[in-house]
Image (spheres, grey):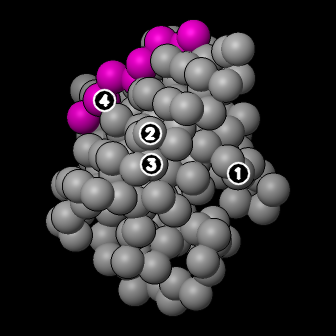
Amino acid sequence: MASHHSLFVFLLLNAILLLSYSAKSDDANDKLLQGINAYRVSLNLSTLVVNKNAECLADQISEQLKDQNCTNTTGTHTVPVGNYPKLLDHCHLNATVTRDGTIMPACIPDLVPGLVLTNFTRTKYTLYLNDSKYSGVGIASEDNWIVTVLTTNTSTGSFENTSGSVSIVGLHLHLLPLLLGFLVVLIS
């Protein structure tokens, strides 16, 4: 019965998204968040709360990806994300507070709403959305790219703003696990 309910919620949500979609990025981001939260509720998980710092990082990454070709109709795409320390710095973050986060970029031509939601709920990203350790989210999109950043409520995944500077040595030591996690998500 629960699986029928989950399927019904998923199909109903896709229908709503398809009928009410507008091409604006903020709309795509809001609709994706609504869809992800409906999906998580159907699994008896808590909804994700918007984390402005994760949203800042998602925005910076989507800005960097927007000029990349988008030929993948299923959404996921492997692209390099350079200058990661600079992106963190722009958002007043450091690797220490982002280490347990997850970055999920997707390339969906024209950000078709049904495909956007399906990309996150029916692909390798499902593993992360089904994980109860995630409590926050930041979503941003540019052109055909949409980036979702998941956060935790731990000190190593909270994406809380940092005060002061971080030594380069400390940054590199803490940056490696997040970058490796990012690559695993992209490759798998």
Number of numbered labels in the structure image: 4
- Disc 4 on helix, strand or loop? loop
Q: Are marks 3 and 2 in contact (CB under 8 Å)?
A: yes
> How far apart in space, not on screen, are marks 1 and 3 (Cα)?
16 Å
> How far apart in space, not on screen, are marks 1 and 4 (Cα)?
23 Å
Locate residue 23 relative to residue 95 in the image: left or right.
Answer: left
Query: What numbered label is drawn on residue 14?
Result: 3
> How far apart in space, not on screen, are marks 3 and 2 (Cα)?
5 Å
Going by the numbered disc 1, the residue's amino acid type is Thr
Going by the numbered disc 4, the residue's amino acid type is Asn
Given residues 143 and 5, the one toward you in this image is 5
Q: Quadrant of the N terminus?
A: top right
Q: Is residue 39 visible?
A: yes
Q: In which quarter of the image is residue 8?
A: top right
* Residue at the spot of label 2: 12
Q: Residue at 50% across / 30% down in the picture?
A: 9
Q: Residue at 20% across / 64% down in the picture?
A: 22
Answer with mark 2 or mark 4, whichever residue precedes in sequence. 2
Crowd rating for badge 1 (residues with CA inside 10 Å; few <14, some 14–19, many 20+): few
Query: What numbered label is drawn on residue 98?
Result: none
Magenta segment boundaries in residue numbering: 44-52
- Disc 1 on helix, strand or loop? loop
Q: Residue at 67% across / 15% down in the picture?
A: 2
Given residues 111 and 90, the one toward you in this image is 111
Q: Are marks 1 and 3 in contact (CB under 8 Å)?
A: no
> How far apart in space, not on screen, are marks 2 and 1 (Cα)?
19 Å
- Disc 2 on helix, strand or loop? helix
* Residue at the spot of label 1: 123
Nearest to viewer (mark 1 / mark 4): 1
Answer with mark 1 or mark 4, whichever residue precedes in sequence. 4
Crowd rating for badge 3 (residues with CA inside 10 Å; few <14, some 14–19, many 20+): many
Magenta segment, prevailing SS (helix, strand or loop): loop
